Image (cartoon, rainbow, N blue to C red):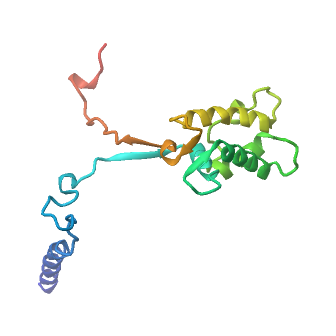
Amino acid sequence: MRLLFALAALTATSALVPAAHAQERVAIPTPQGNSATPIGASTREQPAFTVIVEPVGMMIAAFDADGDGKVTRAEFDAGLKRSFDAVDTRRQGWLGYIAYSDWQERWMGDRNTVPSPFEMDRDGDNKISFAEIAERFDLLFTRFDADKDGAITRKELVTIRPQMTSPPMGRGKKGGRGPN
């Protein structure tokens, strides 16, 4: 009986805790000297979204040498060369596929990011030269520089997509089979 009483008391106490904490919440701020609607009152719940940065986008962002939030073409070219030289320790001017994978992991976070070594090795000699990388990355610079001002901003590197809702699970019409 004591155990039942203790369990009931614990349940009642835990049910009151959220109500007590609810009053500790900070109110939505109201603009100073104005009786306008509180900021955010009409948008209490933000729509779900997904922010995507491609691995190559992270790499390009790291090329911002002066920290102004933009990667100019000169910063891009210098950063690409610096990243290549950091892995080309023998100063051969090319990377084998394994060294290229090391370069991908170091600068883009994973060995399996794109562009793949097979895509980069344009002449099929099993070596990826800096010229081959620069040629491919020239296309990436053009793609990311959406406003064509010669610099890539963080905004141009980020993609925001609405959250996809999955269709309800079920059998569908007449046994769940699609049209024949």
**Residue 3 placement: quadrant:** bottom left
Between 35 and 172, which is closer to the camera in this rendering? 35
- Left or right relative to 77: residue 158: left
Figure quadrant of the C terminus? top left
- Residue shown at 75%/46% (left/top)? 81
Quarter-of-image position of residue 4: bottom left
Residue at 13 percent across and 77 percent down: it is 12
- State the image coordinates of residue 150 (x, y, percent, origin top left): 59, 38
As drawn, the residue found furthest toward the front would be 33
Number of numbered discs: 0
Q: Is residue 35 left or right of residue 88?
A: left
**Quick check: 31 left or right of 8?**
right
Q: Position of residue 131 (x, y in %)?
A: 78, 35
Could you say where residue 101 lies in the image, as x and y percent from the top left? 71, 44
Which quarter shows the N terminus? bottom left
Residue 38 appears in which quarter of the rendering?
A: bottom left
In this rendering, would 168 be left or right of 6?
right
Q: Position of residue 7 (x, y in %)?
A: 16, 79
Residue at the outermost top position: 180
Q: Residue furthest bottom?
A: 2
Name the residue rendered at 50%, 42% in the picture: 156
Q: Is residue 33 above or below residue 138?
A: below
Out of 96 and 122, give the one closest to the viewer: 122
